[in-house]
Image (cartoon, rainbow, N blue to C red):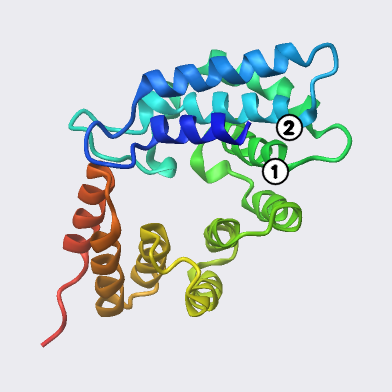
Amino acid sequence: MTIIYLVFNEGYVATLGQPPGRTELCTEAIRLGRLVRALMAPRPPAEATGLVALMLLHDSRRAARLDEAGNLVLLEEQDRGRWDQQQIAEALPLVDEALRGEPGPFALQATIAAVHCRAARAENTNWPEIVRLYDLLGRVQPSPVVALNRAVAIAMADGPQVALALVDQLTATGALNGYHLLHAVRADLLRRIGSSAEAARSYARALELVTNDSERRFLERRLRELPSPQT
């Protein structure tokens, strides 16, 4: 199941260059996930069900993730009318099924994705619930990436200053210093609190590490949009 999800992720956000994603890899990963779940019928493990739900929910947003020029569109800025409602309708009952009993990492990640998909508008997103789910995920599968994603959710629920302290603690460990999204998140939090010079340094570090062209263009645009230093 982990390998299938790695295939999906490579299709969702290509590691290198262009294209920004590979639809055929996402489609094949979903097919394989469904096959694994079917082979384990009539009582497939909750994680097999959670994996299928997770991939369907992420893939449902595919058409809205990039603009016509191939530039990245943030989740909160996406046109939710372009999300695949058929895939969402298939996935949500699977999320509920996967949560019965003791939820594992795939089930919890699918539940987080479901919170986003159940919100008709970005401002309706239940961020405190997402923070709670990341708390659970951090206990079931502790990792620096989970901690980073939790900090992003806390930024939306409680503000960027609280989240920045968490990201700085994570940065101090050195665990994700080669991960461009750590620096991109830190840059965004600094931008939101008005620390433009420090944000620029974090954006520059993220640009040194990023390998996907769509993400690179997004970071370059964010860097250009920062206010010029006062003289």
The picture places residue 168, in percent across and down from the top left corner, at 49, 77
Q: CA distance from mark 2 to mark 1?
A: 7 Å
Q: Which mark is residue 105?
A: 1
Q: The disc labelled 2 sits on which kind of residue? A: Glu
- Dot 1: few (<14), some (14–19), or many (≥20) neighbours within 10 Å? many
Q: Which mark is residue 25?
A: none
Who comes first in sequence, dot 2 or dot 1?
A: 2
Side (left or right) of 24 relative to 200? right
Q: Indicate the secondary structure of the residue bearing disc 2.
A: helix
Q: The disc labelled 1 sits on which kind of residue? A: Pro
Q: Which residue is mark 2?
A: 47
Q: Which residue is nearer to you in this view: 218 or 23? A: 23
Q: Residue at x 63, y 24 (%)?
A: 52
The picture places residue 159, in percent across and down from the top left corner, at 53, 67
Q: Residue furthest bottom?
A: 231
Q: Which quarter of the figure is the N terminus placed in?
A: top right
Q: Indicate the secondary structure of the residue bearing disc 1.
A: helix
The reply to whether discs 2 and 1 touch (Cβ–Cβ < 8 Å) is yes
Residue 163 versus residue 30 in the image, above or below: below
- Dot 2: few (<14), some (14–19), or many (≥20) neighbours within 10 Å? many
Mark count: 2
Q: Which residue is nearer to you in this view: 116 or 102? A: 102
Q: Residue at x 73, y 12 (%)?
A: 39
Residue 174 versus residue 97 in the image, above or below: below
The picture places residue 231, in percent across and down from the top left corner, at 10, 88
Residue 199 versus residue 20 in the image, above or below: below
Q: Residue at x 22, y 67 (%)?
A: 226
Q: Which picture quadrant has residue 72?
A: top left
Q: Which residue is nearer to you in this view: 59 or 155? A: 59
Side (left or right) of 229 relative to 160? left
Q: Which residue is nearer to you in this view: 67 or 39? A: 39
